Image: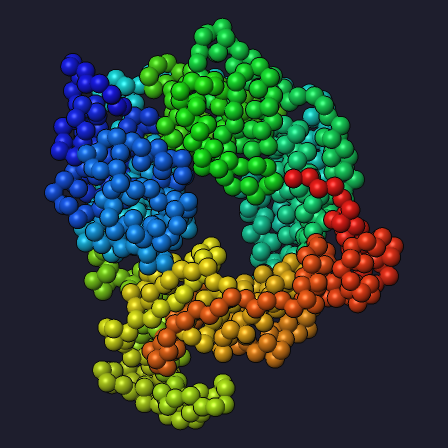
Amino acid sequence: MAATDADPEQSYVEHPLLAEGFLEDRRYQSELVETAVGDHTLVCLPTGLGKTTVSLRVTAERLRDDVGAKSLLLAPTKPLVEQHAAFYREALQIPDDEIVVFTGDVRPDDRAELWGSARVVIATPQVVENDLVGGQIDLRDVVHVTFDECHRASGDYAYVYIAERYHADAADPLVTGMSASPGGDEEEILSVCANLGVSEVAVMTEDDADVADYTHDTDVEWERIELPDAVLEIRDSLNDVITERLEALKELGVTRSTQPDMSQKDLNRMRGKLRELIDNDQSEGYEGMSLHAEVMKLRRAVELVETQSVESVRRYFERQKNAARSSGASKASQRLVSEPRVKEAMRRAEAFDGLHPKFRRVRMLLAETLGIEGGERVIVFTESRDTAEALTEFLGNHFDARRFVGQGDKEGSDGMTQTEQGEVLDAFKSGKFEVLVSTSVAEEGLDVPEVDLVCFFEPVPTAIRSVQRKGRTGRQAEGRVVVLMAEDTRDEAFFWISRRREEEMEEELRSLQSLADDFADEFGGQETLAEYADGDAPASVAPGGADGGDAAGVRSAADGQAGLTDFDDGGGETDDAGKEGGGSDAGGDASEAGTADGADADADEASEAEGTVARADPPAEDDHVEVVVDQRELESTIARDLSKREHVETRLETLAVGDYVVSDRVALERKSVADFLDTLLGGDRDLFEQARDLARHYDRPVFILEGGDLYGARNVHPNAIRGALASLAVDYGLSVLRTEDEDDTADMLDVLAGREQLTRDREVSVHGEKGAKTLTEQREYVVSSITDVGPVTARALLSHFGSVEAVMTADEETLMEADGVGEVTAERVREVVAGDYRP
């Protein structure tokens, strides 16, 4: 793809912004570049054939004559970002300090400063999303955005939000999406194109003559592996429990089958029927949903023991035991670990000292490739991080093997830092070791060197991932792919799914190639997001709000509904808290608002007939409001929603108090119904501490409770819920507001910000740190931090024993003398206090 020394017989790309003699001039790449320069384009090209080169050349062309322009390349992982940055710095005739990297390792303030001087920014999408939400960067001067591995552009993934903002904000936008595998069918591919605002599809396959010159055959071998009896016994014990649980679900009428290997599609359909029962207030729905959750946990254990290793299922059982003992544990988790047949399976897994037969087969394949055949490099892919660790340790006894896993660590195993990932890849490229054992983190786009063998420890049930993995071989020479498949297991099902989906995707790509003009016609009939900005946008993307609302979150007059700000007479505040706006006079103003200037007479009559008492006037052009958002709230869609509203400016901060701030006196704490109910079950002990801090620092603290069925969502007595709400309002002085969902919460924040900043003319001010705890509070906090010990129990223990030291040194029997302390709690305290520390 690139050369360090110019070959006199080789043709190279010539461009004023590209290094001379660096990029080989390939005809298929030039054709793709020509298409991508002309319009928003999805570029489909097999792995290893230069998608990044195509994007680079488009970027160079867009930056050629525009000194003030910027280009943005987005990639899903940090290692991939670093790889692209190194390639761009080598290929572009642009100073290295103008080609910058944005990842979470770069401070937000530094990113804002770097953005101003950069010409090329290469970033992870989450960082760019955060900077857009926080108002740190502006896309106006960005003339080219590349979405690498663009098949991810679906749902709430950051690509979707960034594309929408880019089309709306940029003066001269151009999008290039890149993927070797954009989707499994036409619907998925069209969805990706729509989410990115793409109107052209440019496809090259290995069947194209000029592409075929740069590829070699890759044989795919499927090897069947027979499982030993000890492994099958563990599997069968678990399947027996699954069958029993499915029989109970069958009695509820939500399934006809009790086969433990039923399809995921059937399980999803079953869950839908259970949800209908719950929605109809039938208690069987809750019972069935708990059984369904248990089935899903058991199926995961079966999958691990069949297709991965006994070690991976042993670790899975350990995590399930810990989950079942935690406060607020689900009944499904508790039943799972207490079921005798599951306990027997756990015992068998602990006692098993043999190897899963796949381990031995991998070792033999590596011996053939690296020893007999004289190969140099091998990649082994596995789905499980536990298996990756066990496999690396096992293979390390015979070969120089290292693992390559992601940074996330939600299941207890150690991840890798970005630096560690980079060091491992560099060492693999330079031949310092011969076997890379990787999870999915190495599948997408990483410039992993050409390898002699790609071994799939298990079949991958998605076409996209299978294609990505196979692309690691067969680029410069003939390659070999071996997929290990345990007989009579889920591996076989995944084998057929993978083969069918891969064939479908290959056919879809061929169809895309032959029907490119039809796709262009289809996209040509759609309005772009930028065109919506002219005022004809549907409600979902209209400027001014996620639902097409006007400034301050009020709905427009066209929908015939009143906004909250219309009920305020603007008469100023009173000394009586909570009685702002002048009482009954507000009603008079509201009536006048219903006949405001510009309203159609017929519309007024219709409004009166329907009983409408107020109407929202359109906002002034300069009616902008600001909402400060806590960084941790970015997991919801609320901040993204607000940031897309033209009249709302969002600012991200790590707030010590509250989740949102809309003025110097109003801050809000947001809890979903599920989170709130977890509080009552001991899952979150910080709620009332948060309420106290909010009340200390803000005059008008607000608690937003978001979600639907407050009294029926969990098995919590209604009076416990009412008591908690009453405590928030009476003991802590918080106003408690209900919202239906995240969209409704965003609208409420918009309204509150408008009322405070526009109507009341108040400034936005983030107040200080959390108040320091008293000694009593600190002692309660120490004891209550132990799982299964809440604040009430902590106070009971301290009242009984008199000190933290006395609590921590008491034995189980003595602990149970305190009010409300049972055997489980006492056992947990002693386990935490006296157990050995294992880092």
Front residue of 435/298: it is: 435
Residue 637: image location, x then y, percent = 43, 58
Front residue of 34/56: it is: 56
What's the residue at 61%, 40% (across, down)? 412
Split into 4 quadrants, where in the image is the C terminus? top right
Residue 720: image location, x then y, percent = 68, 70
Quarter location, residue 2: top left
Q: In the figure, 350 relative to 816: above or below?
A: above
Q: How is the image coloured?
A: rainbow
Residue 232: image location, x then y, percent = 69, 26
What's the residue at 34%, 27% (across, down)? 47
What's the residue at 37%, 90% (across, down)? 571
Asked if residue 202 shows in the view, the reply is no
Front residue of 130/804: it is: 804
- Mark count: 0
Split into 4 quadrants, where in the image is the N terminus? top left
Q: Residue furthest top?
A: 372
What's the residue at 34%, 50% (across, down)? 110
Horizontal relation, residue 184 to residue 11: left or right:
right
Quarter location, residue 801: bottom right
Q: In the figure, 352 relative to 377: above or below?
A: below
Asked if residue 217 shows in the view, the reply is yes
Quarter location, residue 283: bottom right
Q: In the figure, 717 relative to 604: above or below?
A: above
Residue 823: image location, x then y, percent = 83, 54
Horizontal relation, residue 320 to residue 209: left or right:
right
